[in-house]
Image (cartoon, coloured by chain):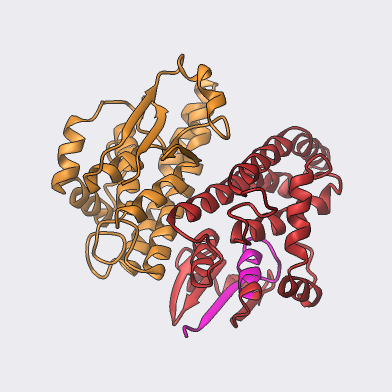
Chain colours: A orange, B red
């Protein structure tokens, strides 16, 4: 049994999908969280000066998606064969495309411009990407509520995390997407995930 | 043996890594290429209205990285176990991070602004990412010339094709990165790749 150490900020962000994978799998790991002022002292320990980083028996792995996919494959949450894993990867990439569209509105310093970008994101861009996600869920989901193959995979966990952030900012943003709402509800009622969501540290993002 | 059909523009772009994978593996596929004016008629056939798309025994898969990873795993070019595959994925994500800033410099219409963005990208942004890639190659490459585990993987093929785009604009961009130059030279001299490079269509992108 390898030893796992996950290092990130004290946030959900790009590491939470991996925490959800550990929780769904019932697997132990060291959950290292740095506050913003602690991070500079540790930056040089990380291969690319960034987090999250997963340390597996002492070898460091950067890049949040590579980390999550590795853990999902370790714990059978990645898809049951190569083609299913590819379908899961396609859903994951589509979720990351959605995040890419979101980030500029978060980084904008000018308040008026930030508000305008946020409005554009929730009004125009988010619905387009959510429509794409519903398309893939109906294409690969075999009629079930999970994105791929009638089973929970890390694609469902990744969507749950960022859906929570978006709904926290704009409560109605999933109203026109009943398939995605049902998907999120299915994930959140899995016993190990329900338990984890109840007990984890509460952070805004 | 599944049947494979890869659909993209008549260019290298985000599909070329998959064409390189087929070439290295010596595997057959239907290489569908649309000119820009042909594409609108086919857009609605694609799950997300985008290309590349890989069709495997009639089932469509979007997202260029998901496609390439699937093919690499089919043909044993993805890394020899789960953790090696994770290292390959981390290198791939870092290559993708490197390429993100390049695309806006190509599409900028204002000539003066385009020159400024290009200068900033090649002068400041790209070198940081190239440094990160050399770091990972030295961390995971076991002292060899390939990014991971002393074997050719799709990470080497992806770097090869994206670097070609950079070199096309700025011929000296790898001059300070001998490890990366050596990596590309190793890829180019693989017999099946050398043959493929000699015979493939010559396109502007």
Magenta stretch? Answer: B1-22
Q: Taking the image as drawn, is residue B170 in sight?
A: yes
Q: How many marks?
A: 0
Left or right, A192 with respect to A180, comes to left
Query: Looking at this rendering, what residue extends furthest in the right direction?
Result: B171
Name the residue: 57% across, 75% down.
B6
x then y, percent, for residue B115:
82, 39
Residue B152 image position (x, y, % from top left): 63, 62
Q: Quadrant of residue A118?
A: top left
Q: Is residue B13 magenta?
A: yes
Visible residue check, residue A127: no
Is residue B20 rendered magenta in the image? yes
Query: Where residue B129 sits in the image (x, y, percent)?
Result: 67, 39
In the depicted view, which residue is nearer to us: B33 or A202? Answer: A202
Q: Residue furthest top?
A: A37
**Residue B2 in the image: above or below residue B78:** below
Please state, as top left, top right, bottom left or bottom right, where the C terminus of chain A lies in the image: top left
Is A72 above or below relative to B15?
above
- Residue drawn where x is 19% and y is 48% of the image: A185
Q: Quadrant of residue B173?
A: top right
In the image, A188 versus A53, the foreground residue is A53
């Amino acid at each position: 049994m390898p030893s796992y150490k996950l290092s990130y900020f004290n946030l959900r962000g790009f590491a939470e999908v991996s925490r959800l994978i550990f929780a769904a799998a019932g697997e132990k790991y060291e959950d290292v969280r740095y506050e913003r002022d602690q991070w500079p002292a540790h930056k040089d320990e990380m291969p690319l000066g960034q987090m999250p980083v997963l340390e597996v028996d002492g070898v460091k792995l950067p890049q949040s998606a590579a980390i999550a996919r590795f853990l999902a494959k370790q714990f059978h949450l990645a898809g049951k064969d190569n083609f299913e894993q590819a379908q899961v990867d396609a859903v994951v990439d589509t979720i990351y495309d959605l995040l890419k569209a979101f980030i500029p509105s978060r980084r904008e310093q000018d308040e008026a411009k930030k508000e305008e970008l946020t409005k554009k994101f929730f009004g125009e861009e988010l619905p387009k990407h959510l429509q794409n996600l519903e398309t893939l869920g109906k294409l690969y989901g075999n009629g079930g509520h999970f994105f791929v193959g009638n089973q929970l995979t890390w694609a469902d966990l990744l969507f749950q995390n960022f859906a929570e952030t978006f709904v926290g900012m704009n409560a109605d943003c999933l109203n026109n997407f009943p398939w995605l709402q049902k998907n999120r509800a299915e994930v959140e009622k899995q016993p190990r995930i329900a338990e984890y969501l109840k007990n984890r540290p509460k952070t805004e993002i």
